[in-house]
Amino acid sequence: MPCKNCQEKPVIKLTNVNISLCKQHFLRYFEKKVKKTIRTFNLLEKGDKIGIALSGGKDSFTVLSILKQFQDKKIITLEALAIDEGIKNYRDLSNAKKFCKDNNIILHILKYEDFFNNTLDKMVKKFKDKTPCSFCGVFRRYLLNYGSKKFKFDKLATGHNLDDESQSILMNQFRNNPEVSARLGPITGVMLDKKFVRRIKPLYFVTEKETTTYSFLKKFPVEYSECPYASFGYRNSVRDMLNDFESKYPGTKHSIIDSFVKILPSLKSQFKESKALSSCKLCGEPTSKEICQACEYVKELKK
């Protein structure tokens, strides 16, 4: 099947809409779709200082590349924030550093070892009764919010795509966590709070396959490898299940996202007045408890 818009050889088939696109038309389609998400959900406002959660992977490079177009037009300013968990032979930020340097983008790096006195590799050996994703996620979110406030970002852009979000929606359903679902969406949170820097997801309506193809065609300097600890997580099982459904019933992931976006305003409204936030008595970061989960884990690591 040739490209839908011309007779050129296609680089991708979009099974949910049953069309194929060549390189030129796919790149145009992809960027148009991301920019529509930004406009529709008002993810960027003129004068915003946007932080990019830069992991060095395909998704974050894609977000950085597209949002740089807005910076070039003097609509926003960009800086990047990378979290170095300390995973041997995996988290190499050299390409991210070079990319940011070549594009005149300031890159901030925060390390687990500096804040928690442990690399993730060391934590895994100590937390033998926990899956790596459970505590790594807590520490990553902690540092992303801490860094976003420290560097005075108005919003933090992440590389979450349609696959990531559809997985999160199902995980919350399976765990009976509607309150956590209320924090999802193209722009996170149920209410404005100065303790949290809101996160935006420009790739919300594009799939993993589309982002991978875009990154490959743009020749971003990324490694297409997965975190060595990902296979231990609950998300991995949900992802495999969803991928199986998508292969049998194309459009499944899009349907999950489309239906979720319709009920999201009601969810946010329902949980807007839930648990008041206070400050952790140990570190001062926001929490709904006396001591935040990150500090609870740090206490365990010291035992």
Image: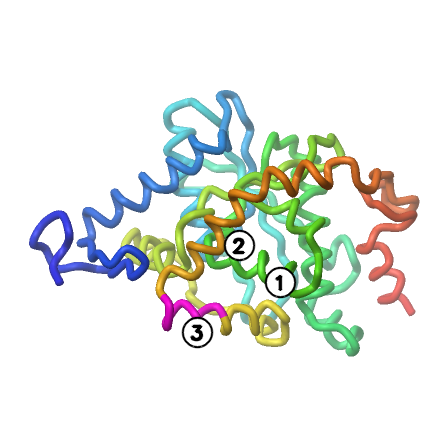
Q: State the image coordinates of residue 89 (x, y, percent, origin top left).
A: 55, 71
Give the residue pinned by disc 2. 165
Neighbourhood count class around disc 2 (C-alpha, 10 Å): few under 14, some 14–19, many 20 upward: many
At label 3, the amino acid type is Asp
Find residue 244 and name its label.
3
Residue placed most toward the observer, 110 or 39 = 39
Determine the residue positioned at 84% across, 51% down.
Answer: 292
Residue drawn at the location 44% of the way across and 59% of the way down: 253
Q: Nearer the viewer, mark 2 or mark 3?
A: 3
Residue linked to disc 1: 171
Q: Is residue 95 visible?
A: no
Gap between marks 2 and 1, in whole Å? 10 Å
Judge from the rendering whether residue 247 lies leftward or rightward of residue 179; answer left or right: left
Residue 135 point in image, percent of width and height:
73, 63
User: Which label's residue is closer to the chain start, 1 or 3?
Assistant: 1
Splitting the image into 4 quarters, where does residue 70 fall? top left
Which contiguous range is marked in magenta?
242-249
- Residue displayed at 69% across by 62% down: 136
Is residue 84 in the magenta section?
no
From the top left corner, tell me how far across and down residue 42 is, in percent: 49, 29
Q: Quick check: 229 above or below 298? A: below
